Image (cartoon, grey):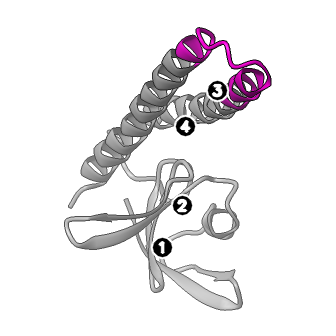
Amino acid sequence: MSKQTLHQYCLHLAQEQVDNLNAIQAELKDALGSESKSTAGDKHETGRAMIQLEQERAGHQLRQAEELLLALQSINVLLPPADSVQLGSLAITSKGQFYISVGLGKVVLEGVQYFVVSPTAPVAAALIGKRLGDEAQFNGQALTVTSIE
């Protein structure tokens, strides 16, 4: 499996997250509209306030998801592999495979487990700058870089 395939899958996951949050926003907008037609007094005001809080939370999550998608879109996976681990690298180590891009967490693709991590994640910070054969320390364990794609 290629890094390009993994990257495309991550883009798909990020876009799916944005789409889901957009759908939630639309549902909350509709709910707020129907809530405003009610005449139940205090109960009505509480319902509106709860919906507005949910809208704010969903809006915040949507902005984060859009930023994540933009960050992924800015990574050029067609560049040749670098000599050392950096943003956009797929670092294969003795303890796992780490795609240094955005914080999506564990992703399983074609039966293989990858950790899609932000460059600011502690494991990425330990790996960035390491070359083939170098060892990084993370959580008291040594990770040897066996391949960089």
Pick whichever of labels 4 and 1 is earlier in the sequence.
Answer: 4
Q: Nearer the viewer, mark 4 or mark 3?
A: 3
Q: Which residue is mark 2?
A: 84
Residue position for label 3: 55
Residue type at mark 3 is: Gln
Mark 1: amino acid: Leu
Q: Residue at x 60, y 53 (%)?
A: 118
- Within 10 Å of disc 1 (Cα), the crowding (few <14, some 14-19, many 20+) is some
Q: Quadrant of the N terminus?
A: bottom left
Provide residue 88's location: percent of width, then percent of height.
48, 48
Contact check, label 1 and label 3, Cβ < 8 Å: no
The residue lying at 75 percent from left, 26 percent from top is 49
Magenta span of residues? 32-51
Q: CA distance from mark 1 to mark 2?
A: 7 Å
Q: Residues within 10 Å of mark 3 (few under 14, many from 20)?
A: some
Residue 132: give x, y in percent of width and height: 48, 73
Main SS, magenta region, reads: helix
Which is in the foreground here, disc 4 or disc 1?
Answer: 4
